[in-house]
Amino acid sequence: MSKIELSKIDTRAPKDLDKKEIKEKTEKMLIELDELQNLLFAEGKHSVLVVIQGMDGSGKDGVIRNVLGNMNPQGVSVRSYKAPTPEELSHDFLWRIHHYAPPKGMIQIFNRSHYEDILVTRVHKWCDDETANKRMEAINDFEKLLQKHNSTHILKIYLHVSPEEQHERLSERMKDPTKMWKYNEKDFEEAKLWDVYMGMYEDCFNNCNTPPWTIVPADQNWYKEYIIASKLQELLKGLDMQFPGLKK
Amino acid sequence: MSKIELSKIDTRAPKDLDKKEIKEKTEKMLIELDELQNLLFAEGKHSVLVVIQGMDGSGKDGVIRNVLGNMNPQGVSVRSYKAPTPEELSHDFLWRIHHYAPPKGMIQIFNRSHYEDILVTRVHKWCDDETANKRMEAINDFEKLLQKHNSTHILKIYLHVSPEEQHERLSERMKDPTKMWKYNEKDFEEAKLWDVYMGMYEDCFNNCNTPPWTIVPADQNWYKEYIIASKLQELLKGLDMQFPGLKK
């Protein structure tokens, strides 16, 4: 498998795409996704884990709201990971993750995830390279456990924005009264570490790739939503699910 | 407060209502609910607990899917309570409930709830009247704790269906291949205990009424959804919320 280099991947949709057409396709897929999720729940054989990573302002919340939020909340659960609590830190780094692994029939969404333990922590040197390498091994083993022992299908999504687009979105939070609650001045400090972050992300994508990451051009919401809906639809369709008959 | 007698409350919409008009009103409210929920999340001062109770086939899943499922799943969480596990039974009956009380900013939905501990358990005489009375006191104290110590606003919904409508819906589950997974032959056995159930529900409504229960005529989905959307909207609007300004 060739190595991922983020700087060589476009953050925008291909120029020849028709926005209106793509949006219509997404709308149709969202209806189909709702039906597929219902079938996943009814059949109760598989589970799905959607891991969403991306820089501040890359649109993680929007994906959850507009794509994944369209399904039945009874079968879709969201866990947002923030800085670990003292109790969480007193355990191994996967302890707080494992508890939220999806049971059969469910779609679990991680807004940030165990990957932060080899991303933000590395950028700030709270975690050295040796520890990071050990963590990547542990992550691979952990994901294998979910895949092999609970039919969990994992979709890893990286929202790929440009630094320019990020700057615009973070600035917007300072101006729009309905977005100010999201503003954090530290985000601008973090943004200065862009290149270091990109290096750590690449390392992560190239070492934790079973399944491989989906790098989603994320400067335009309509394209980002289309790609993610497509990927999830492809995954669910591939499960060859059926409604169970009457219990005996 | 006058006592609730379920047999005197209609399970259908008032005859003079226009279904199409009501459905349009509901659609509008769903958009407003989505905005109000976003504000609740952004402000982070209040939390909301929606308790949904009702006989089998009364449409609990449908309410979650069609009314509550329209909001952002990042701020709306669903917990379905089934028969307690051995671990849960080794604790007090509110232990498994308390853990899922909503944090500030969140809407938590209970599909069945702690009320089962004074409903199904009483019907089957797993819980005697004395224990039931003590449990009702404990429930009142518990809900007061959430209300006073975490700004939790509680909306208690009873889906009021007629036994005829229930029978039709349960029978449908045996015929429709996409619904067979919901079929449980025990549901028909439970349905025979209708009058006993109604008595226990009335006792519950009359003793655990801060806030009072909303009895929702639930034979017609369009009317049920309208009433629930209205009640939730009224609750959220009453909180007088505002977007926070920039953090300092």
Image: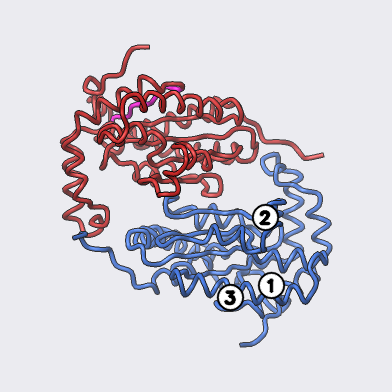
Chain colours: A blue, B red
Q: Secondary structure at mark 3?
A: helix
For the magenta stretch, what is the residue range?
A: B211-217
Q: How many numbered markers are drawn? A: 3
Q: Which residue is mark 1?
A: A135
| Residue A147 coordinates in the image, percent (x, y) | 49, 73
Residues at marks 3 and 1, CA–CA distance in whole angstroms: 10 Å
Q: Residue furthest bottom?
A: A1
Residues at marks 2 and 1, CA–CA distance in whole angstroms: 16 Å
Crowd band around label 3 with a 10 angstrom C-alpha radius: few (<14), some (14–19), many (20+):
few
Name the chain letter of the residue that bears numbered label 3.
A
Above or below residue B216? Residue A159 is below
Q: Residue at x 58, y 77 (%)?
A: A212
Q: Amino acid at mark 1?
A: Arg
Above or below residue A110? Residue A151 is below
| Residue B207 coordinates in the image, percent (x, y) | 38, 20
Q: Are marks 3 and 2 in contact (CB under 8 Å)?
A: no
Q: Are marks 3 and 1 in contact (CB under 8 Å)?
A: no
| Residue A61 coordinates in the image, percent (x, y) | 60, 53
Which of the two residues, A214 or B183, is positioned nearer the viewer here? B183
The image quarter in which residue A15 lies: bottom right
Q: Which mark is residue A88?
A: 2
Above or below residue A196? Residue B197 is above
Q: Which residue is mark 3?
A: A141
Which of the two residues, B179 or B144, is positioned nearer the viewer here? B144
Query: For this view, does A2 lie left or right of residue B61?
Result: right
**Dots 3 and 1 on the same chain:** yes
| Residue A5 coordinates in the image, percent (x, y) | 71, 80
